[in-house]
Image (spheres, helix red, strand yellow):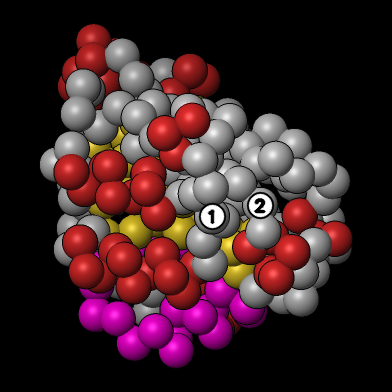
């Protein structure tokens, strides 16, 4: 499961510069010099993995309602760019398959965060696994999720691909969780991380990644603590 991760990873592409979780945002991250990007994946109503962070369309498209209620064809009609800036008008919601192809063309590594709707964790994980396996793209990739069901499914069906457990605050039983699922990394909210926790995690020989870090001074401090990588909306600034 060895994979080399740079210190800076574009968050949802380059979410400070372009509409998050779109191909435009992925391209922007590459143009800014990012070597890796992170993006969020959910399922459409017809089971297609697409890029979206929220469970509803309201914030980042001109649509409304839950993602899980819309087919891919319906999602294709939506504008996922104008909310950010009119220059991105009619930017579509991309599929995971399209995003992986673009990442390969741009030479980007990917952190695929799986965000299942309630009661669909295993289904979502398996759909993502199918796309990743069928893509046959030889590039660097990490799969991550807050859902332990997702992590367990990845452990069972995509064992050789590195897994990262996502948490808000580092739980007391973090070590047993990472051991259980043979995880490569722990991903946590930098606001709740202490230097002592960072030292302990690194001493246990796990990679430590922090989200979402947009302040250069904070980034420097985290790196000084031993944090391996940070996710940033502005990968060109930190």
- Total marks shown come to 2
Please indicate, yes or no, whether residue 155 appears anywhere in the rendered image.
no
Q: Magenta span has 130?
A: yes
Around disc 1, counting alpha carbons within 10 Å, would you say few (fewer than 14), some (14 to 19), or many (20 or more)?
some
The picture places residue 94, in percent across and down from the top left corner, at 51, 61
Instruction: Calculate the distance from the C-alpha at mark 1 to the C-alpha at mark 2.
Output: 6 Å
Residue under circle 2?
78
- Disc with the residue nearer the chain's start (1 vs 2): 2
Quarter that holds the C terminus = top left
Q: Which residues are magenta?
A: 124-145
Checking the image for residue 223, the label placed there is none
Q: Quadrant of the N terminus?
A: bottom left
Q: Measured along the vertical axis of the image, is residue 195 above or below residue 98?
A: above
Question: Which residue corresponds to the image point at 66% horizontal and 52% vertical from the top-left?
Answer: 78
Element class at badge 2: loop
- Which residue is nearer to you in this view: 89 or 36? 89
Which image quadrant is residue 125 in? bottom right
167 w.r.t. 115: above or below: above
Horizontal relation, residue 221 to residue 11: left or right: left
The local secondary structure at tag 1 comes to loop
* Marks 1 and 2 close (CB-CB < 8 Å): yes
Instruction: Name which residue lies at 54% across and 84% down.
Output: 130
13, above or below 235, in the image: below
Asked if the stretch drawn in magenta spans residue 104, the answer is no
Q: Would residue 34 be visible to someone looking at this image?
A: yes
- Residue 236, located in which quarter of the rendered image? top left
Is residue 28 shown left or right of residue 153? left
Residue at mark 1: 92
Q: Residue at x 56, y 74 (%)?
A: 128
Image coords of residue 100 (percent x, y): 37, 69
Residue drawn at point x = 24 percent, y = 80 percent = 138
């Amino acid at each position: 499961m060895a994979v080399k991760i740079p210190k800076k990873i574009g968050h949802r592409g380059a979410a400070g510069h372009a509409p998050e979780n779109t191909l435009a945002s992925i391209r922007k991250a590459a143009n800014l010099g990012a070597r890796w990007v992170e993006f969020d994946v959910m399922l459409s109503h017809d089971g297609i993995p697409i890029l979206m962070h929220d469970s509803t369309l309201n914030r980042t498209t001109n649509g409304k309602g839950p993602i899980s209620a819309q087919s891919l064809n319906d999602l294709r009609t939506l504008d996922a760019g104008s909310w950010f800036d009119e220059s991105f008008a009619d930017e579509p919601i991309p599929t995971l398959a399209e995003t992986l192809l673009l990442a390969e063309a741009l030479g980007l590594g990917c952190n695929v965060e799986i965000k299942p709707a309630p009661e669909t964790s295993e289904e979502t994980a398996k759909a993502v696994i199918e796309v990743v396996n069928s893509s046959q793209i030889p590039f660097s990739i990490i799969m991550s999720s807050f859902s332990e069901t997702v992590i367990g499914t990845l452990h069972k069906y995509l064992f050789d691909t590195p897994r990262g457990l996502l948490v808000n605050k580092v739980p007391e039983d973090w070590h047993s969780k990472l051991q259980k699922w043979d995880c490569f990394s722990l991903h946590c909210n930098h606001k709740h991380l202490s230097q002592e926790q960072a030292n302990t995690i690194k001493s246990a020989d796990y990679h430590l990644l922090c989200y979402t870090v947009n302040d250069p001074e904070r980034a420097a401090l985290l790196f000084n603590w031993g944090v391996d990588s940070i996710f940033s909306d502005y990968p060109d600034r930190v």
